[in-house]
Image (cartoon, rainbow, N blue to C red):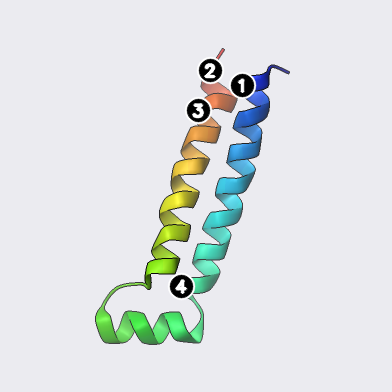
Amino acid sequence: MGSSKLIGVVLLVVGVALLYFGYQASQSVGGQISATLTGQYTDETMWYLIGGAAAAVAGAFLTFFKK
């Protein structure tokens, strides 16, 4: 396994973990109240979701498409 594939797998795992934490934060009581009152998620939740999506996409690209 090449170093780029190894980095890709690590990024993919980290990205999925961040997405999970972002989902959990969005389903919390505080997240639900904030989303109800303001119409959007908290900044922390958004960073988890954006960072997780970016890391997962980069990791998937390095793992599956990079040769």
N-term-proximal mark, 3 vs 2 = 3
Q: Where is residue 65 in the image (x, y as percent from the top left)?
A: 52, 20
- Contact, mark 3 vs mark 2 (Cβ under 8 Å): yes
Check disc 1 and report its element: helix, strand or loop: helix
Tell me if residue 38 comes above or below residue 6 in the rendering: below
Name the front one of labels 1 and 4.
1
* Residues at marks 4 and 2, CA–CA distance in whole angstroms: 33 Å
Disc 1 and disc 2 in contact, CB within 8 angstroms: yes
Q: Residues within 10 Å of mark 2 (few under 14, many from 20)?
A: few
Residue appearing at x 49%, y 76% in the figure: 27
Residue 61's disc is: 3
How many residues crowd mark 3 within 10 Å: few (<14), some (14–19), many (20+)? some
Label 3 and label 4: CA atoms lie apart by 27 Å
- The label shown at residue 26 is 4
- Tell which circle, 3 or 4, labels the residue nearer the N-terminal end: 4
Instruction: Give the SS element for disc 4.
Output: helix
Which residue in the structure is indicated by mark 2? Answer: 66
Residue at the farthest top position: 67
Q: Distance between the residues labelled 1 and 2?
A: 8 Å
Q: Do the residues labelled 1 and 3 touch (CB within 8 Å)?
A: no
> Disc 1 versus disc 4: distance between alpha carbons?
32 Å
Give the residue at mark 1.
4
Can you tell which quarter of the image residue 6 is in? top right
* Mark toward the start of the polypeptide (4 vs 2): 4
> The residue tagged with tag 3: helix, strand or loop?
helix
- Residue 29, numbered circle: none
Q: What element carries label 2?
A: loop
Measure the alpha-carbon separation of dots 1 and 3: 10 Å
Residue under the point 53% across and 17% down: 66
